[in-house]
Image (cartoon, rainbow, N blue to C red):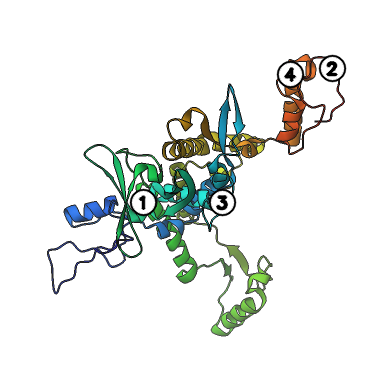
Amino acid sequence: MGKRKHAKAVVKGAGKSAFPRATGDQLFTGLNDPALLEFLRTGSLPAVTVSVDQALANPAVFRCVDLVSSSIGMLPTYVMRKNGGALEKAEGHPLFDLLQFQPNSWQTAFEFKQLMQLRVLIHGNAYAVIVRTGSKITQFIPVDPCRVLVKQLPDLTVRYEITRDDGSIGYYAAQDVLHLRGLSVDGLTGVSRVQKAAETISIALQAGRAAERIFRNGMMVGGNLKHPGKLGEEGKKFLRDSLTEIHAGPENAGKWIITEEGMEAKPFANTAKDSQLIEARASLVEDIARVFGVPRPLLGMDDTSWGSGIEQLGILFVRYGLAPWFKAWEEALTRSCLSLVERRSFLFDFDETELLRGTLKDQAEFFAKALGAGGQRPWMEVNEVRESVGLGAHPDGAGLISAGENRNVAP
C-alpha cells in the first residue's frame, strides 16, 4: 500500500473484480484504523465513515475541538518539586523551559499542546518523539498519528513504528515517545471520537447540505397577495415589477407593502417541516457536544437556562471536561520523561487557576478570608496573595497574620 500516511485502499484491475475495492474518495486514518480493518476483512466499508476534514467542516465539531485544545494549550504546565508537604516550581529542571516556553525549534508551548490535544480528540492518539542529548530531553517532535503503528511485543514491551517522509520506518521504544491516548479499549491506542460519532456527524453534515440546497435551489416564498377580484396579465406584471423594484434586496427587508383595490398581504409562517429541520440540527449539536464533553452554552447555542450561573458552567467544564485531560497529560509526561528516581522528587502540574478565577469581588472575599478576616485563622501569607494576583513580594508580607494584628500591608 506504499506509505502509511493516509493509506488509500484502491485495487487496480480491469472489468468486474471480486477483490475489495474502496471508493475513490475513501481515506483511512492509518493502518490501525478500524475502518481499514473492516475493509480488509470483509471487502466492504462500515455503514458510515467520516474523514477528519469532513468532521471539522461541521461547526459544532470544530468548536468543540478548538475550545478543548485551545484551553489545554493556554494553560501553563509546570514541573514541580516536592519539598516536604509543599510544592514549588522546579525552574532549574531541563523540562521546565520546554513545557513553559518552547518544546521544539518551530512551535511555542501553546501551539505544541494545542496540536497534541487536537490530535488526541479527533484521532484518539497524539504522539511526539522525545529527542535526548545524553540523558537530557531537548525537544518534543510531534508526529502525525496516521504515520504511527503501536505494537506490543512478546516480552510485553511497547514499540512505536513511525513512517518517515521517505517511506522508511523508524522503531522507537516507549520511553522515546510521548504518547497521549484518549479513552482506550485495548490499552494501547485510544478511541477516535470522530469515528465513534461518525453517524451523528454525518447526519449533521447532511442536514447542513440539505439546508444549503434549500437556500440555493429551493423556492422561498415569503407570502402571498390576495386580490378580491381577478388580475389580468398586465396587472400581474405591474405588481410583480413594482414589488421587485421597491422591496427586493437586503436593504429593503422588513418594509411594509402598500396594497390597493382591496388586496390583502399574508406572510407565510414556518411550516412544521421547517421547524423539524431546525430542531433536528439543534439536537445533533447537542449529541456532538456530549461526545467531546463540552456544555451546550459554550457552543454558542441559545440556551438561557443557566442565566447568572454561567460561572458555575465554566467550573463544570473545567472539572469534568478538562480535568481528565490534565491528568492524562501529567501522567503521560511522567511515564515518558521522568526516571523512577526523579518521580520521587518531581511531578507535572497543569495550572487551571486562570480558568477558575472568579470575579474581582469573589477574589477579594476569598483572599480576605485566607488572610484571616472575620477572626478566622489565616492560612495564606500576604506575599502569597500578592504573587497569585501578579504583584511582587513585600518586605513585610511574609508570615501569617495573627488575629488583631495590623501590618498595613496592601495585598
Mark seen at residue 198: 1
Disc 4 versus disc 1: nearer the observer: 4
Residue 395: image location, x then y, percent: 82, 29
Most extreme residue toward the bottom, as rendered?
Answer: 234
Q: Indicate which disc, 1 or 3, sits on the residue closer to the N terminus.
A: 3
Q: Which residue in the protein does label 3 denote?
A: 102
- The disc at residue 405 is 2
- Does 311 appear above or below 151? above
Mark closest to the chain's N terminus, 1 or 2: 1
* The residue positioned farthest toward the front in the image shown: 134
Badge 4 local density, few (<14 within 10 Å), some, or many (20+)? some
358 above or below 133? above
The picture places residue 137, in percent across and down from the top left corner, at 48, 46
Closest to the observer: 247 or 34?
A: 34
* Residue occupying the point 59% across, 49% down: 101
Amino acid at dot 2:
Glu
Disc 4 is placed on an element classified as loop
Q: Quadrant of residue 373?
A: top right
Amino acid carrying mark 4 in the image: Pro
Left or right placement of residue 4 versus residue 351 in this view: left
Image quadrant in which the C terminus is located: top right
- Residue at the disc numbered 4: 378
User: How far apart are the two marked residues, 4 and 2, measured between alpha carbons?
Assistant: 11 Å
Q: Going by the image, does 393 lie left or right of 206?
A: right
Residue kind at label 3, given as amino acid type: Gln
Q: Is residue 68 visible?
A: yes
